[in-house]
Amino acid sequence: MQQISPWVARYWDLIPKDKPVLDLAAGKGRHSLFLLEKGYKVAAVDIRTEALEALPATSDFTVVTADLENDLWPFSHAHFSGIIGVNYLWRDNFETMLKSLSAGGVLLYDTFAVGNERFGKPSNPNFLLRPEELKNLCAELEILHYAHGEVTDPHPAVRQSIAARMPL
């Protein structure tokens, strides 16, 4: 299993355990598995879920197959104590996604930013955060931690990351 995001590794324990955590565009489920091992209930969503369905079956783990970029938001009636978004950006759903974060819930978001194109993919500006964009997208939340710049772990990239809490 691939290493979890250093950002998630640093701030995962800010997420309350009162409701499930949403692993957004979960991929192979590295963050889902990590959070399950820490005692959280997890809902993982991705357009392709074969790899997620291969993870150990438990009543604390729900897999949702959805095209987050073309379908309606599949969690319009759900509330999560945390939302994890790593290496994924679809601006059109960001506001809707935040409405699924419960009061006191924590967003951990860690993805690529402008400048990353010199390191490789993604290089399309549609998938790169502009300076301060993540802060602006989270303007209604209490920003606990924020970073923007070059990183070397797990590989060289330009990233923007935030840990933010939905006000009570």
Image: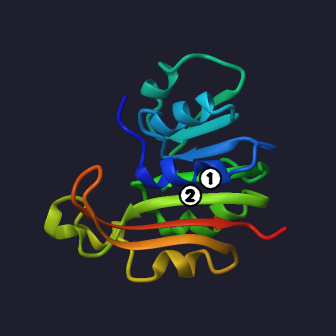
- Residue 50 placed where, x, y %? 44, 25
Between residue 116 and residue 52, name the one nearer to us. Answer: 116
Q: Residue at x 50, y 74 (%)?
A: 134
Dot 2 falls on a residue whose secondary structure is strand
Residue 40's disc is: none
The crowd level at tag 2 (other Cα within 10 Å; few <14, some 14-19, many 20+) is many
Camera-side mark, 1 or 2: 2
Instruction: Tell me which colouring the rendered structure shows.
Output: rainbow
- Residue 93 placed where, x, y %? 57, 64
Horizontally, is 91 left or right of 19 in the view? left
The crowd level at tag 1 (other Cα within 10 Å; few <14, some 14-19, many 20+) is many
- Residue 44 placed where, x, y %? 57, 38
Q: Residue at x 24, y 68 (%)?
A: 116
Quadrant containing the C terminus in the rendered view: bottom right
> How far apart are labels 1 and 2 at the CA level?
6 Å
29 to 122, vertically: above or below: above
Viewer can see residue 71: no
Viewer can see residue 21: yes
Q: Please name the amino acid that badge 2 sits on.
A: Leu
51 to 125, vertically: above or below: above
- Residue placed under numbered mark 1 in the picture: 83
Q: Residue at x 66, y 54 (%)?
A: 14
CB under 8 Å between callouts 1 and 2? yes
